[in-house]
Amino acid sequence: MPLIIKDEYPEKLFREDGKRLDGRDKHELRPIKMEVGVLENADGSAYLEWGNNKIYAAVYGPREVHPHHLAKPDRGILRVFYRMSTFSVFERKRPAPGRREKEISMVIKDCLKPVLFLELYPGTSFEVFINVMDADGGTRCACTTVAALALADAGIPMRSLVSAVAMGKIDGELITDLSGIEDKAGEADLPCAMTWFNEEMSLLQFDGSMDLKEFSESLVLAKDALTKIHEIQLETLKKKYIEIQEESKGGENVK
Amino acid sequence: MMNIKRVISTIEKNYILSNLKKGERIDGRDLWEYRDWTVKNDVIASAEGSAEVTLGETKMITGLKYDVGTPFPDLPSEGVCTFMAELLPLASPLFERGPPGDQSIELARVVDRGIRHADCVQTKKLCIKENEAVYILFVDIYVINYSGNLIDAGGVSALTTLLSSHIPEGKWVDGKVEWTGKYLTGKTIVNELPMVITYGKIGDIIFLDPSLPEELACDGKISISVTENKITSIQKSGYATFSIEEIEMLSKKSMEIGNMVKKELNLEQYRPK
């Protein structure tokens, strides 16, 4: 059945003053807000607001593997479940996970794996559940970023954090951090993630068209953006412990 | 971080029970007292109505999406309002992935029945053209953190979502739907505000708003949906049995508590003027 209002794209993605539709400069990130330890029941959890994206991530593990045949005798396994809520997008999403969600889950899993010491946890599983409550472009990058935070919050040994951002090209210009509309109407979308222990790319996808010069320029610009995101992640993790420290100094009982 | 298991230890169960016998709860509440509520509306930009509700540590986000479809043949001039609940595996180690289980279906059904039988959603206002086009509303409840009593929180979050809804208004022109540029809001589509109130029972002790340990320890629960002066639905779950006197007492109490909570949360504030 058709919806009454169509999801329409504007012809131009830059305003007359040279700024993007949401008022950002070419390489300006959307406002990012992160928080850790937001879910009581999880071993580790994080919440992220990235522009209009609202995402919860929770980590359970190390715990028993279900179904049992997936367990590996020599190492632990990492499982990532990326899911979108039905109301997070323009047209209601069907509640059952689709092919897109399964693919993104796999991409995020492969991205996070290099930072974990899975060989230290034979026979167990780490499960990362990521739920996008509201979506507005770049969810796979936002999810990778928030999943890394949740893993760190769970106290799981990690080589480093992982940060991700989507680079892109709209109206012939390179930009950082694509919004939903820029993603759909733009010319190229380049989500990438960096593992900071070796400063290498751990997630890299590309859709659209760019020449080699633009591509390498994008990767350089990506690193600047990733550095900023990494800073915010570190601040968020530190903040939790500063708060605990201050609470205990005040003579109150720590939770 | 909580250590939650499917089974509650006998010692904890006995502790809960001995406290209840003295008229006390393990979290310091009165037998007829709710945990703290918080309600926020319009939290999801992509949804046509949304709410974030917490009851103690229980937390959920509800959103509304719409579609235009053909009406049911027996109700040609009435729209449809459906409810779905998803118990996300991130909300509790007790929840598993996969298709909806008994608990999530019960949550959606009880919330649905409470609202459906209460003259709450004005389905006649959701009709664009008789026999041809009506609105189908999807109210989807996502549980973010599970700490007992999902049903009461689900009821309030579904209601707040409907109250704060803003659905593009369509009209029937030459055999198809055209958008008028105006919106249908909670003002037009919601009338009565039914509240669903859940009690737990252990032995012969009944108490309001079971928390997670109480839910795991209790013999059964009863959820009663009420409007200002009417009962609209009842659901008993678990193996506890309730005497006729108890049911009468709870029905009466539900109206008192329902009106009190409605006032305390000031749900009317989410209805557009």
Image: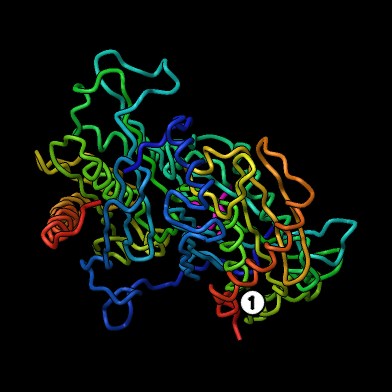
Give left or right: position of A233 versus A72. left
* Front in this rendered view, residue B252 or A231: B252
Residue A233 placement (x, y as % from top left): 19, 54
**Could you tell me the amino acid type at mark 1?**
Thr
Q: Is residue B84 above or below residue B79?
A: above
Q: Which residues are magenta?
A: A85-94
Q: How far across and down, in percent of the image, does residue B145 sit?
A: 44, 49
Magenta segment, prevailing SS (helix, strand or loop): loop
Is A239 drawn above or below residue A13 in the view shown?
Answer: above
The N terminus of chain B - image quarter: top left
**Residue A136 in magenta stretch:** no
The number of callouts visible is 1
Please, what secondary structure does the residue beneath circle 1 have? strand
Q: Is residue A231 visible?
A: no
> In the figure, A121 relative to B173: above or below?
above
Residue B109 x, y percent position in the rendering: 69, 49
Please indicate whether residue A235 sits to the left or right of residue B203 in the image. left
Residue A75 shows up from this direction:
yes
Which chain is disc 1 placed on? Answer: B
The residue indicated by pointer 1 is B185
